[in-house]
Amino acid sequence: MSYDYNRHGRYEERICEVYDDLYQIKNEWRSVKRVIKITSKTLSYGKCSLEQHYYISSLDVAAKTFAHIIRSHWKIENSLHYVKDVSFDEDSSRIRTHQAPLILTMLKSLAINIMNINQIPNIKKARKLFGWSPYKLFNLSSGLK
C-alpha cells in the first residue's frame, strides 16, 4: 500500500509492506503474525530523505489498516511529546529521582488535556496566564480563545 500527499511545502510518500511469511522467526516469537515495514520518502525544499521503520504485530489486518494504526500512533506521540518539550521544556528537566518525574509528567499531561478540551490555541500563553493566576483555571472563559 502506498500513499502520498503535499503538506507544508513538502511532498511525502509512505509505503506500507506487510510480511506474513515468518518461518525463520516463528519459533522465537510465537505470537508474531506480521512484520510491517513503513518506508517514508520525503522531498522538502530540494532535499530528499528516506526512512524505514519496522514493526511486529499479532494482528491479522490489511496493510491499509496497519498504515492507519501506525500513523495514528505517531500523531499522538508527536503532538503530545512535542507540546511537552516545547511548552514545558520537558527534555531539559533535571527531575530524575523517585516518583517525581512520573508525577510531573502526569500533571503536564493533565494540563495539556484541560487546555485541549477547552480549545485553547496557545499553550505557552496559557501556561503563563495560569502560572501567574492559577485560579483562572476554574474560569476558562478568560479570553484565551
Image (spheres, grey):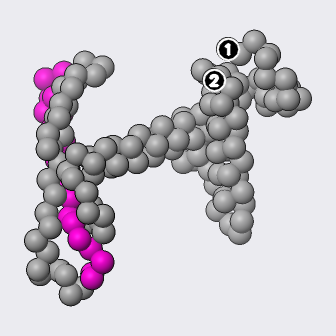
* Percent of width and height locating residue 53: 23, 54
Which residue is nearer to you in this view: 59 or 43? 59
Instruction: Give the vertical position of 108 relative to 57 (above or below).
Output: above
Magenta span contains residue 48: yes
Few, some or many residues within 10 Å of mark 1 (<14, 14–19, 20+): few
Residue holding disc 2: 119
Task: Give the residue drawn at x 11%, y 80%.
Answer: 23
Residue matched to label 1: 145
Marks 1,2: beta carbons within 8 A: yes
Q: Is residue 73 left or right of residue 68?
A: right
Q: Secondary structure at mark 1?
A: loop
Give the residue type that dot 2 points to.
Gln
Looking at the rendered image, the quarter that the C terminus falls into is: top right
- As rendered, which of 62 and 73 lies closer to the eye? 62
Q: Earlier in the sequence, mark 1 or mark 2?
A: 2
Residues in magenta?
A: 29-53
Q: Where is residue 49 drawn, in percent x and y?
A: 16, 38
Instruction: Tell me the quarter of the image containing the N terminus.
Output: top left
Residue 31 magenta-drawn? Answer: yes
Tell me the SS state at disc 2: loop
The answer to whether 30 is drawn above or below residue 123 in the figure is below
Q: What kind of residue is marked 1?
A: Lys
